[in-house]
Structure formats: C-alpha cells, structure tokens
Amino acid sequence: MTGAITRAIALVAYGNAFLRQNLGPDELTLHHPVFQFENKVDFRGVKRGWFGRRKEVILAGDPAEWLRQLQANGAQRLILDYASDHTQAPDHQLAGMVGGGGHWFIHSYDGRGSSVWVGREHVTRKDDPERRIWEVNYWLLKQLPQVDLRSSELTHRSQQLREALGAICDFSKEHAPEWWKRNFKPAADVLDGAPFDFAKEHVSKAVPLAFYPEDLQRLFIAASRAWVFGGMGSWNDIGFSEEEVTRRYDQVSAELFSAVNGALVAATNEPWQG
C-alpha cells in the first residue's frame, strides 16, 4: 500500500483510540513507523483576513496536537473514507503516482456534523540521509452538517474482496506470469482461514492491535497483500496484445482495486461503529 493510505489508517485508528481515552496522543508522533519517511506532518486550513483575502494557516503542527485540538472541539469519532477520481484515467492505473488513485478522506465527527481532512504530500528533503524526504499537509476542506454513520458492511466488503481475488487469480492462471498467481493466492488464503502472524505484516503498524480482532486483522492482511498497483514492475506494468484479454485485465484490476479500498475502509472503521 502507499504511504498515504497507511498514514490515513493510522490517524483514524489511533485517533479513535485516543478520543475513547484508551491511548495517549503521543502514541502517534513522527517516531511511529507509519511516518518513517516523513519529516513533517501538519494540519492546515484557510481563513479570511483583511479585505476577505484567504490566508493559509497551520492549525496543528503534528498529529498529537491535532488530536488534542479535535478532542477540545468536541470530536467524538474519526471516520476513514475513500472517493474515486476518474478524471484522467482509471484509479488503479494511477495508484502508484503521488496524488493518484483516488482520494482518502478523514471525517472528524462531533455529534452534529463533520469536518473533512485530506492529505497532500511533497518532497522537501530530497537527499535526507534518513530518507525522511516527505512533508505531508492535511488540509481542512469543509465542514458538513451531517455524515453517513451507517455500518461499513464488513461482511459485504470481505466477500467483495474474496470474489475479486478469485477473479484475478483465475485471470492470472491463464494470462499472467506464474509469480502473479503466487502473489494473489496468499491474500485469498488468509480470508479462508490460513494461519497468519499479524505482527509480521507491515499493515499491523498502522493500527493499535488491542482494538482490532482476528477478523479485522485477516481483512487488513488480505487487502494489503492484494495491493499490487504501482509503477514499473507492478501489476499495472503488464500489457497484452489481445484486445479481449486487455479488456478483461482492466476489469479484474479495477474490481480488485475497488474491493481492496473498500476492505481497508471497513476494517479501519469497524471497531468505532458504536
């Protein structure tokens, strides 16, 4: 998965644990593994100054300060959300590019409505010896009078991912190199009860384990293992000469991309539904 997705999951998961007074805000500093390549993560907004001019302001200088502010302002819950963006190309084809692959949002719900945050990242320390090259700014986009708090339909999302993995496994057997079949099968197997060690999976760093039971861990693992969308050498880099095979490849790829994102949203939000 991309760093942007992992960060968003961590902010929601650890943020909710803090708002429920189960964790301190300092659990999520830049020393946390999800921020291993970031030199700054702050939170910004736009205010109107003299003569109605719009002015960018830093609302919180780091995740811990942001969480404290949310709590002070009455936030009850954080909600992860994803929206596709087909303006240039199918989302899965752009997922390996900075800013591509759709948009990940964080809703901060206070009982009356929600504030919506979205991250933007750019390189500020290209030659950093510790590889902390990225600065990430989360922008307050707008405040909504209400937010959809319905269940994320965990069972549906899990089944959707299982079906998408089955379809892409079948396609890989017939048309893709052998190693892709070997790549997708472990993702499908974990949904069907295969043993696993969540602590050894990279995605485990994004969530406080005490709040995510086995069924959610399995969904996280399957989704993260099925994330094959990047640049050179990734699933997106495959090409076919036959038009019908290409059409089918695009279809199963888009379905898997949608299922993976839906599973990540559902698994992240599930412990905080009540």
Image (spheres, rainbow, N blue to C red):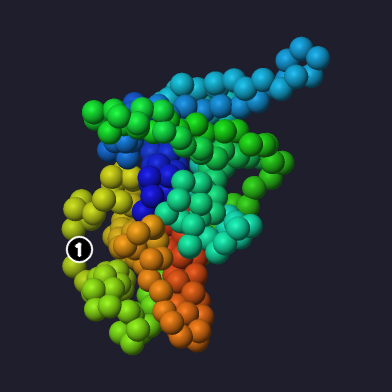
**Which residue is located at x 55 percent, y 40 percent?**
118
Q: In terms of depth relative to the viewer, which is nearer, 104 or 171?
A: 171
Examine the image and state in which quarter residue 173 appears: bottom left
**Which residue is located at x 55 percent, y 50 percent?**
103
Label 1: how many Cα within 10 Å (few below 14, some 14–19, many 20+): some
Examine the image and state in which quarter residue 227 appears: bottom left
Residue 201 percent location from the top left of the image:
24, 54
Residue at the top extreme? 50
Residue carrying label 1: 196
Residue at the right extreme? 51
Quadrant of the frame with the N terminus = bottom left
Tag 1: amino acid: Phe
Residue at the front extreme? 241
Residue 177 against residue 136 in the figure, above or below: below
Q: In terms of depth relative to the viewer, which is nearer, 46 or 22?
A: 46
Residue 93 percent location from the top left of the image:
48, 62
Residue 43 against residue 261 in the figure, above or below: above
